[in-house]
Amino acid sequence: MNESMSWWRRALWSNWPHRLTVLLVGLFMLQFVFWFAKEDHLWLPETVVVVELVLLIICVVEHVTRLHWAIRGLIQLIAVIAVHVQVLHEYGVIEKMKLSSFFSSKLFLNLYNLTPYLWFGLAAWAAYLTLIWWVAAKWRVYVLLVASVVAMCIRDSFSSVYLWPQVAMTVGCGLFLLILCHFQSMRQKDPTAWSYLADYPASIAVPVILLISMTVVVGAIMPEVGPMVTDPYTAWRAYRGEAVNFTTGKGVEVAVSASDTSSGYSRSDAALGSGFQFDYTPVMTVDTTHRSYWRGETRSLYTGKGWEPGDSDRRSLTTSVRADNTLSPDPRKAGSKLKTIEVKQVVSILSEDKYPVLFGAFDIQKVEEMNGGKTGFESLLWAPSQSEIRINQQMSQAYPKTYTVVSQMPVIDEEGLRQAPEAANRTDLAEYLQLPDHLPARVRQLAADITKDAADPYDKAKAIEQYLRTTYPYTNKPDLTKGKSRDFVDRFLFEIKEGYCDYYSSAMAVLSRSVGLPTRWVKGYASGQSASYDEMFGMFGEPEMTDPDAAGVYTVRNADAHSWVEVYFSGWGWIPFEPTSGFLLPRAVPQEEITFDTSAVPEAAPAAPEPTVLERHGLKAVISGIVLLAAAAAAFVLKKLQVAELLHEKLERRRASLLKQKVIIECERLIRICKRNGYVRHEHETLREAIGRWSQQSKWMKADLEQVLGTFEKAKYSNAEITEQDWQSTAAIVEKLRSQF
């Protein structure tokens, strides 16, 4: 019995420093896997599972120290391949593979089917074994620990990825590895003491583990307190007057400076102004049959400082969703000549925030589903006059995570709207014509000047919209020191002369009311970014082939929070307008106007037969031979032509060439920025023609665009040299325009 226990003891404790090293390195690498899994669109779920299982297998096999290293490596390789086959089959990436197929001519074909996942597994295997060797010395452990902690802290501080648990575990693993290095050093310097520890490792392991564990536990349960010293990044941003907003692991948003807020759907619009920081946290995804703005609430009472609900907003008649899930129409739409198209949206809320309304394209007509069911709409209140689906705040039901709505999106018939008469029943629309008594006279005079040549209400609204879009630059950081007036719109129009959507939309609403157009202020979200959007698509010479108003899945972020204007036209109803510079209102086209010319579509050619495995490999062999022969011939020619000497002669001209490329790249970046903000370069246009059109559309950026165009043409078409100053000036202008959009 004693001999048996002695054997198990030797098997368990023999070479325990190596066993602990293997375990700690595995835990160390696992923290990086957790990090990569938290990053959006970096690793697929099956990749994470594969790498985690590979690390587990290597850890287990490395504990069998009596096996020869070559046998351990072979076992690990076979296990790694088996893990890939099983996991990828479970995730539906590949079909089930038989074991016998790996011992046949299909071996390499099967391995090819496991790529690119196999490369991740093999890389994890190689990294694991390399780190086991690397941590054998103290200085290497210090380098690894410091580099890892710094990388995680930087990523945690400058993004929404929360990595503090991984930092804590990394530090713990590093401390234990340093202790093991100390034991290895003691093994060489004091063999007697080491011999005792080797026989009785628990005598030192238990106190060390308890000490470190108690330290971690006490730190975890201690109450949170604010930092005693401001970190350098926060201090630098605060010195520049910029806000620093970040989210803790418990979902609490902390703002270093209260002068600016983060972008998002505002709960109160009573005091507009100031600036904001763009927050790109996702709010929802919208799977829609047509791109649109996602409308939230309306406001009718302008106070001079901001917007508040008017009497009808507060006292509006609300109804429940009907049994057939339809919503009662707005009584003002009776007899409307407005044409619409049906738009279906499936909204999935990603944020934990609660909103007072359901978002959807204007005008919502039906609620089909909520949280996956076709019932349970008791918490919904429909306000037809405001076209809002409100959430009953008195009910304890949580805000829906998913819902499906159907909207009737208005088709803008400009010729028909120009025939719309002045609003007849102005008493019924009085709240949408309201203006504060202290509104400066120069605002009313500006409205009259803008619309003096407009013959009808629609042209008046369009004139005001275009004036705002082309006169004032967009910025999320307006210079508030220029503002002296007590009225928000007056400050924007005559003093600050720059701003973001709240400035533009409020200004259009007030100017429109000044010339007798019933108007209401609307807030919600812009369309967001389509899942198929590619920022690199549409560079120089690349035409835009996609429909900007197409169906798709749009990701809406806090940065997409937006406000715009709706104007009432007699006999038509409410029509949306977009006065904000750089934004384009989604366009609805009637179904009958969409035609396709099928006469020019060629018949599909018969599909070619799929090549066999042998044919594919034979073709690869021929191509490989040709490539090798070509490489040998090229090497011989290069040597004979003394290419190295020629390259040396061209080194002096390389710097100028690189500067030209940098200028061209900055111009390409400017085009992508302009396209995202509604300034699209058409397929038939040269860059000069496009910039000329943009300059006419928005005169405030004419000088900057012309300067960038001159430098670009000099770099691309001229033999003149580009200086460092030319490139830096171009980059500075592009960055300036980006911040003003």
Image: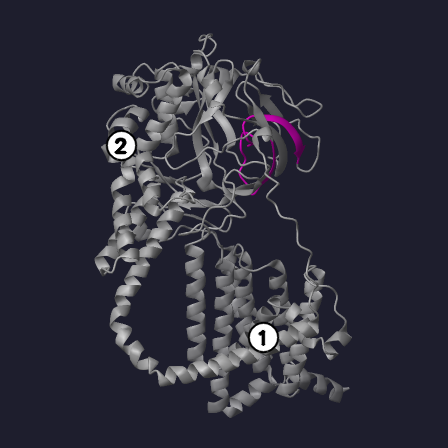
Specify whether residue 472 is in view. Answer: yes
Was residue 375 drawn as part of the magenta stretch in this picture?
no
Q: Is mark 1 on a helix, strand or loop?
A: helix
Closer to the camera in the image, 259 or 555: 555
Question: Is residue 463 toward the left or the right of residue 53 in the image?
Answer: left
Q: In this view, does 581 lie above or below 506?
A: below
Colouring method of the image: one colour
User: According to the image, label 2 marks what residue?
Assistant: 496
Magenta stretch?
A: 343-370
Asked if residue 217 is positioned above or below residue 403 in the image, the reply reads below
Picture coordinates of residue 129, whole percent (x, y): 55, 78
Task: Tell me if 592 is positioned left or right of 718 in this view.
Answer: right
Mark 1, residue position: 125
Name above or below for residue 598 compared with residue 192: above
Secondary structure of the residue carrying tag 2 is helix
Q: What residue type is labelled 2?
A: Ile
